Image (spheres, rainbow, N blue to C red):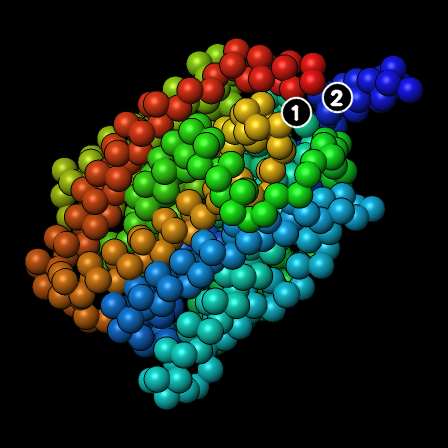
Amino acid sequence: MNNGKREAAGTAAGKALEALGTWMKIGYGAGDFAANITFQTVTLFLMYFYTDVFILGASTAGMIFFIAKIWNAACDPTMGYIADRTRTRWGRNRPFLLFGALPLGIAFFLLFSGPDLSPDGRIAWALFTFLLFSAAYSVINIPYGALTANLTMDTTERSSLTGFRMAFAIFGSLFAAGAAKPLVALFQDELTGFRMTGLIFGAVCVAVNLVTFASVRERVAPPREAHMSFREDLAMVRRNRPFILLTISTIIQMIAINLLAIMVNYYFKYNLDAADLIPVAFLCLFATAMVAMPLWVFLSSRWGKKKVLMTGTGFLALMLLGLLAVPRGATGLVLAIFVGAGVGLASLYLCPWSMIPDTVEYSQWKTGMRREGILYGFFNFAFKFAAAFSGMITGFGLDIIGYQQNTAQQEGTLSGILMLMTIVPVFFIAAGIVIIGFYPIDAAMHRKMVSEIDAR
């Protein structure tokens, strides 16, 4: 009997280490296209929609961002806790892609619907719909992210899988960045344009999530474990030092990226007087990042994920500093620098997501418990907290520098916009590089952890 159990365990472990098929990688990766056409539209354009289309004050919009994203940060670990305790014939995480797709699409449409309300009513609507969207996003995105750890235990396959996923993520970012504004411009006014864009993007998000559900199968079965309380799960997270370092570093660096993304709208509209080039600027960032992704995947197999992350984000910081030396009006040079920045940006798309599954094995190695849901829930907190904090910095920062909607800005305001897009993000990037330098897991350590887990 014991021999039979060992043989079954060995078969399961072997299956979990097998190479994944290309179609499964594509199907899984497509899910991040759906995630990013919604998430990146919010990151890139919601602040602008609030201030210049829905006509909310900048600091009010910033506080709505902060409250909604902190709420989202609370939803993520809760969703991870629920997913860890879900058992269905479809697996632990897949069912949420099926049942969460339609609510997310509806919530995204409502976010940009912009009804005709009083000033106080607009504030209440903006907050309510942002909270609704944030909760719906957690229901799908936390289980989706945790699927990486459920599909394979091979660290090289995870890098490949994450490369597919991040290529689709960047394509989703690219689609949101390049298509949103031109699509808005097809309609008679910006409000109607954003409303219809929300409807179209929401429908695409629903369809693609259903495709991902149908494309993947969970191959890493969770071990039978004693039930733990939420407090015990939190204690397990706190003891996972690699996870804590990765999460803090990611929070800090994503604050920088979100600041850059938000300020592109204001920089091109006011500093460069080239609002029509905003989609081009985002294309320069995200198209280049997508093209550069295979380079970083290749280098991560040679150098290791940590070194690639530090190198790529360091290069991104150098590109941002280069914008300080660009003469005003040199739009072509600005776009060229954005292309260089996109190369570095690709490493930040790839590495954290390919590193987080390794921290799942670290936790299982140390504690005997496999809790990918709660870890992914807290890791997604990094992105939501970063969005909250960057939104608040942007809102209050714009007020401090004297920003006025839809009018020519004073010289000091233009300088402030440039600082918010360069110096402030570079500070956060540098801090993130220092912290991730202490991350301990490399390929050799991961092989040792997986071997010892299998031996148990």
Using the rendered image of the protein, determine whether residue 93 is visible from the camera's viewpoint: no
The residue that disc 1 covers is 153
The residue located at (65%, 19%) in the rendering is: 453
SS at mark 2 in the image: helix
* 373 sits left or right of 285 in the view: right
Q: Residues within 10 Å of mark 2 (few under 14, many from 20)?
A: some
Residue 414 image position (x, y, % from top left): 14, 56
The residue located at (32%, 41%) in the rendering is: 252
Q: Amino acid at mark 1?
A: Met
* 93 sits left or right of 322 in the view: right
Judge whether 266 appears above or below 57 on screen: above
Q: Amino acid at mark 2?
A: Ala
Quarter of the rendering occupied by the C terminus: top right
**Contact between labelled residues 2 and 1, with CB atoms less than 8 Å apart:** yes
Quarter of the view holding residue 145: top right
Residue 242 image position (x, y, % from top left): 44, 28
Quarter of the view holding residue 43: bottom left
Residue 220 image position (x, y, % from top left): 72, 31
Task: Tell which of 84 and 235 is nearer to you.
Answer: 235
* 173 sits left or right of 164 in the view: left
Quarter of the view holding residue 283: top left
The residue located at (24%, 48%) in the rendering is: 421
The residue that disc 2 covers is 13
Quarter of the rendering occupied by the N terminus: top right
The residue located at (42%, 45%) in the rendering is: 382
Earlier-in-chain disc, 1 versus 2: 2
Residue 170 image position (x, y, % from top left): 50, 41
